Image (cartoon, rainbow, N blue to C red):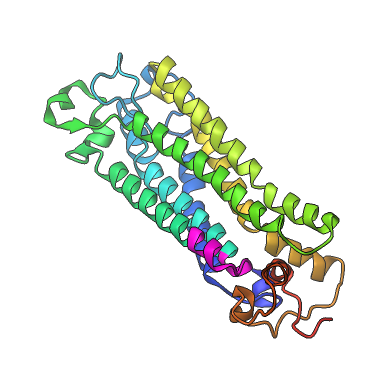
Amino acid sequence: MVVKFSRVSVWGADDLMILATFSFLIAFVPLNANAGKNGAGQDMWSLTVDQITEYFKASSCFPVHDAISNTNQNFYIIQALYYSTIAFLKASILFMYLRIFPGERFRAVLWGTQAFNLAIGVTFLLLGIFQCRPIHLAWTAWRRDSESLGTCMDVVIIAMVYSAIQVGLDIWMLILPLTQILGLNMKWSKKFGLMFMFSLGLFLTAASTIRLKLLVDYHQGTHNFTVGSLQIAIWSDIELCVGVFTACIPTTRQFFRVFIFGRPDGSTSLHSEHIRGRSLEGSPKRSTRQAAEAVDEPSPHTP
């Protein structure tokens, strides 16, 4: 925000998306942490009825059919926040790519990826909200007397499928900028610097993969839902926080460049059309190189 409000960098759609992401994250992290108060990490049958109901309602999991033998898990309020946060986070990163890289074919691929991310986000958000009929079974189905009142989907499987898709999308979004950087007309030392910066997204992929592994283990192993969900809750926090950091890497680079190392800022006269490549002229390699320099957003007057 310091970089944006000080006009070191212009505002864009990626900034709006990361603000939305951060807003959801502010709600997600405390609610996830509150799961410990309601029983996360504790033996389910050592809790009171009110604690279990509140736990399933506000923070995480519930058994779909039988409270003892079924290993299905559901994230209700937290799940909805999680899906929304991930969707806005990926949208922010993709909009950042759209600001940096001007190639028309590449931009078409980015818009296609953006549409896929939107479709996945909306689909799984709706699945999370309407997983049970009636909806209140999401936090009351653990009681035996509520078992005959409706039905619920196998939301653990849904969560696993979603996580697997997100890991694949993470890898795809790591590959995308690397394909452009390799064609830049610049020294290899600078290429490696850019590749390293974008490759920091591997931390997000690693966190997503660990969370997926925990979901699989949870589904296959535990019959005690409050005990088994604690690590998943922790890694959900880690995944989202690492994701926000990853999306902010280019802006963080600008912050250190201008405010820490004191390099002169000549970026305030740079317009979004120039960043997007509409004013770029010359060969494809030259255009791609100038677009890559938009990470630092140098002044058009810079030699």
Q: Quadrant of residue 295?
A: bottom right
Bounds of the magenta segment: 98-110
* Rendering coords of residue 41 (x, y %): 49, 25
**Image location (x, y in percent) of residue 22:** 53, 57
Q: Position of residue 257 (x, y in %)?
A: 81, 67
Of the pair 71 and 28, the residue shown nearer to us: 71
Q: What residue lies at 48% left-to-right and 63% top-to-bottom? A: 108
Quadrant into which the N terminus falls: bottom right
Q: Extreme left residue here?
A: 148
In this picture, residue 195 sits left or right of residue 203: right
Residues 38 and 257: in front is 257
What main secondary structure does the magenta stretch of the protein show? helix
Q: Residue at x 70, y 85 (%)?
A: 269
Q: Residue at x 68, y 67 (%)?
A: 288
Location of the C terminus by quadrant is bottom right
Q: Report if residue 100 lies within the magenta region.
A: yes
Quadrant position of residue 94: bottom right
Residue depicted at 34% across the width and 36% down the height: 54
